[in-house]
Image (tube, helix red, strand yellow):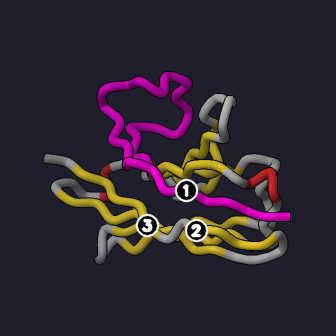
Amino acid sequence: EVQLVESGGGLVQAGGSLKLSCAASKFTFEDYAIGWFRQAPGKEREGVVCVDSDDGIEHYADSVKGRFTISIDNAKNTAYLQMNSLKPDDTAVYYCVARVICENDDLDDPNDHWGQGTQVTVSS
């Protein structure tokens, strides 16, 4: 069974940093666009960053540009999200996803693989 498992979430003060990890099993990262989404209470799931598999271009949400950085270790089949200068508005459940393409508005696409999510809470 294809599986993505996130880790690294937690509670941090505003201005602090966290690094999330996403480990994949039963498929190869290199075949997919890899991204991170987040969902805050009462809000829709929103894209944070996505990296296309063909050109490696990173697409960041404006709200996290300059603060968050995605990296992928294909040898370990693991993706990371380094989050710096965290703000209370960054509080959400963060999900890792392996997608066919980044530019896909259908978050229920059966060809995508989602992790279970990890909670990030930023206190003011």
Q: Which of pointers 1 and 3 indicates the residue nearer the eye?
A: 1
Q: Amino acid at mark 1?
A: Gln
Q: Which mark is residue 119?
A: 1
Instruction: Tell me which residue sits at (55%, 52%) in the image.
Output: 94
Q: Find the magenta span and give its range.
A: 96-124
Residue on which disc 2 sits: 10
Q: Quick check: 91 left or right of 55?
A: right
Distance between mark 1 and mark 2 Cα atoms: 6 Å
Q: Quick check: 14 left or right of 119?
A: right
79 in relation to 112, above or below: below
Quarter of the picture holding the C terminus: bottom right
Q: Which mark is residue 67?
A: none
113 in relation to 74, above or below: above
In the rendered image, which quarter is residue 103 located in?
Answer: top right
Instruction: Tell me which residue sits at (66%, 37%) in the image.
Output: 41
Q: Which of pointers 2 and 3 indicates the residue nearer the eye?
A: 2
Q: Position of residue 65 (x, y in %)?
A: 79, 58
Density class for disc 1 (Cα within 10 Å; few <14, some 14-19, many ≥20) is some
Which numbered disc flags the more N-terminal residue, 1 or 2? 2
121 is within the stretch colored magenta: yes
Density class for disc 2 (Cα within 10 Å; few <14, some 14-19, many ≥20) is some
Q: Which mark is residue 7?
A: 3
Q: Amino acid at mark 2?
A: Gly
Regarding mark 1 in the picture, which secondary structure is present there? strand
Q: Amino acid at mark 3?
A: Ser
Mark 1–mark 2 CB contact (< 8 Å): yes
Mark 2–mark 3 CB contact (< 8 Å): no
Total count of labels: 3
Instruction: Tell me which residue sits at (74%, 54%) in the image.
Output: 90
115 in relation to 66, above or below: above
Q: Position of residue 86 (x, y in %)?
A: 78, 66
Regarding mark 3 in the picture, which secondary structure is present there? strand
